[in-house]
Image (tube, grey):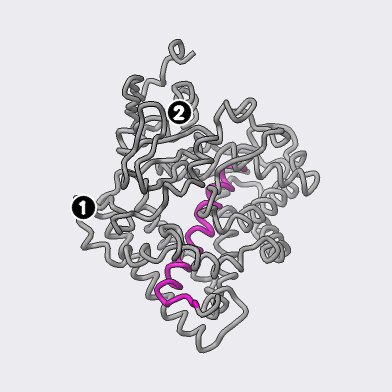
Amino acid sequence: MSETIPPPPYLSFNRETRRLGLDPREPRFHQDPYEAYRWLHAQDGVFFWEEFGLWCVGRFDQVNALLRDRTFGRQNPAGIPDSRGIDHDRTHLTAFDAVEAHSLLELEPPVHTRLRTLVNRAFVSRQVERLRPRVEALANDLIDRFAAGEPFDLIPAYATPLPITIIAEMLGVPVEMGPQLLDWSHAMVAMYTLGRTRATEAAADSAARAFSDFLRDYIGERRRRPGDDLLSVLIAAQEGDQKLSEDELVSSVILLLNAGHEATVHQTGNAVRAIMAQGGDPRRFFTTPEATAATVEECLRFDAPLHMFTRYAYREAKLADGVTVKAGEQIGLLLGMTNRDPAAFAEADAFDPGRDDMKNVSFGAGIHFCIGAPLARLELQVSLKTLFDRLPGLRLAEAPRFRDTYHFHGLEALVVM
């Protein structure tokens, strides 16, 4: 089959060397990456992506296993949080690197184990479930503010304020700081997009410094006047004689604030778009709590907000016949491609919350499984059900377009009425 189906015109592929030439900024690709993914699945799903300089994997069973394989990890064995600095010069990234150096996402055991144990207590399902009434009240309040009878952009009106408000309230950070937190977050996560510039790096470092300074001041205030918020809990968090240092506390809060809204904003927009594309009454997807949960899981599979998750090899490892990576090399796990693997899903490109093969890797797996997954799932379940229960006739006012930000995958705008 792979010999008879032509590749999309914007990519080149050498079957003998498995070399892929595909500019992730190609508009046809970032508007619909699944066209390329379908073709690449027919080529075995393991390839060297020239533009990233990485061996990449997109087969479900293999990615699911690699996420758990301790042969690979997030921490750079060379000790640098992110080795992709422009011209390998990182002298202008001291504040950003200081945050990354203590980030759960970039560390491995034993440090990762200690930090995750201390932070995780606030994100277990039973703790998160207590937030359901607050999330529902906030969702209804935001819907009440929608422009009546006029087109409006659902991303800033609904998808963005809900998760940033919830995570700010959880942490005890002033909710009115939301816009500033978003600006800092956007500047920092821009470090992980291909083709970043020196200006991108300078903006990320400036944001990391300002974010850290704000949190150090706020942590000092919380030490003097503890509350019942997560920040106060983290300050007091103790496992045996272990506590979070101030640097670890700052990095952990920045990670929770950034991760606590960035992916959820993208997933909310992607999910609303996918559900509306099915036609008919959207309330049919939310008739019971079980149906709502299944719909959210299918949204996570069908159009995930993160399409690449990189890891370092800690020793030589084989990825496929003729493909071996050396210790210290990075690989790319293509989560968006993995979730559409036809070998793992019946009618992989169909939106079907009732499917028997429900699974996804959108939150990762193994020790780096997303710590905020229970919160993200609850926010999506409540926000999507509330939106479509309240506005079952919601429709597109403009064709939605995705942002040019691979490997993040989210909409520039979702204008509805």
Q: Residue at x 43, y 75 (%)?
A: 215
Q: Residue furthest bottom?
A: 224
Q: Which residue is under mark 2?
A: 45
Q: Position of residue 376 (x, y in %)?
A: 61, 55
Three-letter amino acid code at disc 1?
His
Mark 1 Cα within 10 Å, few/some/many (few <14, many 20+)?
A: few
Secondary element at image label 2: loop
Q: Residue at x 73, y 46 (%)?
A: 292
Q: Quadrant of residue 108?
A: bottom left
Image quarter of the C terminus: top right
- Relative to 278, does residue 205 appear above or below in the rendering? below
Q: Residue at x 49, y 77 (%)?
A: 243
Q: Which mark is residue 88?
A: 1
The magenta segment? 242-271
Three-letter amino acid code at disc 2?
Gly
Q: Position of residue 338 (x, y in %)?
A: 52, 35
Q: Position of residue 284 (x, y in %)?
A: 77, 39
Q: Position of residue 157 (x, y in %)?
A: 57, 54
In this view, the residue in front, 13 or 391, is 13
Q: Residue at x 74, y 50 (%)?
A: 390
- Relative to 370, does residue 122 appear above or below in the rendering? below
